[in-house]
Image (spheres, rainbow, N blue to C red):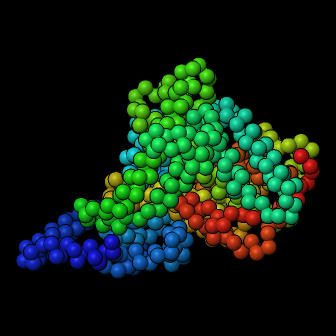
Amino acid sequence: MAVGAVLDDLAAKAPPFAATALVAGLLLCFVFLRGLSHKQRNTGLPPVPTVPGLPIIGNLLQMKEKKPHKTFTRWAETYGPIYSIKTGAETVVVLNSAEVAKEAMVTRFSSISTRKLSNALEILTANRTMVATSDYSDFHKMVKRYILTSVLGANAQKRHRSHRDAMVETVCRQIHDQVSGSPGEAVNFRAIFENELFGLALKQAIGVDMKSIYVEELRSTFSKKDIHRILVIDFMNSCLEVDWRDFFPYLKWIPNNSLENKIRQVTFRRKVLMSALIREQKKRIASGEELNCYLNYLLSEAKTLTEDQIAILVWEAIIETSDTTLVTSEWALYELAKSPKRQDRLYQEMKNICGLERITEEQLPHLPYLGAIFHETLRKHNPAPLVPIRYAHEDTQLGGYFIPKGSQIAINIYGCNMDKKQWENPEEWIPERFLNDKYDPADLYKTMAFGAGKRVCAGSLQAMLIACIMIGRMVQEFEWKLREGEEADVDTVGFTTHKLHPLQAILKPRRSE
Ligand code: HEM
């Protein structure tokens, strides 16, 4: 429903005199409290610069472009690295430089540790049960420890190594088959990698790569493709659902049934599918089969969690493994396919270190150019351009400005990585910039791509291992060239920055399988 229609509806429901008196009373209280709170809060710090907008709706109309990170970055050129906007009744402070972003994520973390979720995300994440969406609390610390110990930490990643190695071999084999079956035809790398990466996610999370499952509640058998759609794609698309009540919380009492029903349906299908997957794995575990997976770990170690909480946490590990690493690998291969010189440089680097052998994870520290390609891809094509919104739960300060309690904080990582003061020619993909002495090759956090501080991404090691090996192997095996007309195809789509159209590249094997 449009905002105007909502306001008309409200006016029609209230008797005119009562409504006028009520509005006047509320306005007086508001003016009085505002004055009072200003005096109470006056810290001597100036308020953040604001982007001018319209009454009631604020800057909403100026954000029609579906990529707010780009709009925010453009505004930073006029209003500076920190400014505030109004999205309806909400004040959002937007941070666009590494300096203020780090201040928010590290120095002022204690005042800005709480997530602000949209109505859709509250439902989709089962009231913040995921590590990534929970508020910073004992629960968050406990579940972050669980996912690191069982899946994402360095030791856990060693235990899951065979799954990663097997996945890379399967992807290579499938691409070789396709290239030899239809030489000269463009290959859709995403279609192949997406399926195998999802298989890896399932192995880490529930112990097996499921080919299909029967779900009693839906009286249907679902293929692996269906499972991927329900667990990953439907969720990602639903994250983008905009509920106008997010911008006008005081109107939350007005139902928005069509949106809520849609979201609840996505949540229901995920719930029953996850239950079916977990039931199946419990049978395996009961039959004595040893499964090194997150589900097994949570069932035996996380005694205080409910079954529903375990299902959400296991699903979280699946969805997070399946998406952002795919986005990064595809963009890196797009850039390399566009740049034969850089592709050749990477090939030579690997030849020097690996000889005729296939690249291994142990060799990664000796392949600085491959590392630079990974970091430059994260910088330019960051899969998570905006950190999930936080809000200041007490008065605080950022960049020398006063930030009142209740402000939402949008950390624009894309903006930080496009900041002309920090990066020379930020629009260009130049991996060589990371070969500079000022960067420690082992540092995973050369850009803000993984966030920072206590809520830094838990999956950065896994993302680096999978993406670097996948990029390296693809270049060891094939010469990559973009299909004609692909050069300008740089648009993105989705909650993470998926390439709008899958990369289509012509591949020439460098050696036979
Ligand atoms: C290139 C790939 C990835 C990028 C760019 C990325 C980026 C991010 C960012 C920006 C955050 C938010 C940090 C914050 O709120 O301060 C985050 C959080 C998180 N990420 Fe990643 N991520 C990636 C891959 C992964 C993978 C593969 C996993 C797991 C399988 C993962 C698991 C998580 C978790 C659990 C959190 C929540 C951490 C917390 O709230 O304490 N990420 N990630």
Instruction: Report how many numbered discs are placed on residues in the image.
Output: 0
Q: Nearer the viewer, residue 1 or 42?
A: 1
Residue 459 lies, in percent from the top left, at: 60, 44
**Residue drawn where x is 24% and y is 61% of the image:** 253
Q: Nearer the viewer, residue 485 or 117?
A: 485
Image side of residue 436 versus residue 397, left or right: right
Residue located farthest toward the left when viewing the structure as drawn: 17
**Residue 450 makes an appearance in the image:** yes
Residue 162, picture quadrant: top right
Residue 421, picture quadrant: bottom right
The image shows residue 188, relative to residue 289, as above or below, that is below
Residue 34, picture quadrant: bottom left
The image shows residue 178, relative to residue 53, as above or below, that is above
**Residue 145 makes an appearance in the image:** no
**Residue drawn where x is 40% and y is 71% of the image:** 85
The image shows residue 353, relative to residue 186, as above or below, that is above
**Residue drawn where x is 43% and y is 49% of the image:** 267
Residue 338 lies, in percent from the top left, at: 79, 67
**Residue drawn where x is 54% and y is 43% of the image:** 221
Residue 17 lies, in percent from the top left, at: 7, 77
Residue 142 lies, in percent from the top left, at: 46, 34
Image side of residue 338 versus residue 229, left or right: right
Image side of residue 448 versus residue 59, left or right: right
| Image quadrant containing the N terminus | bottom left
Residue located farthest toward the top when viewing the structure as drawn: 288
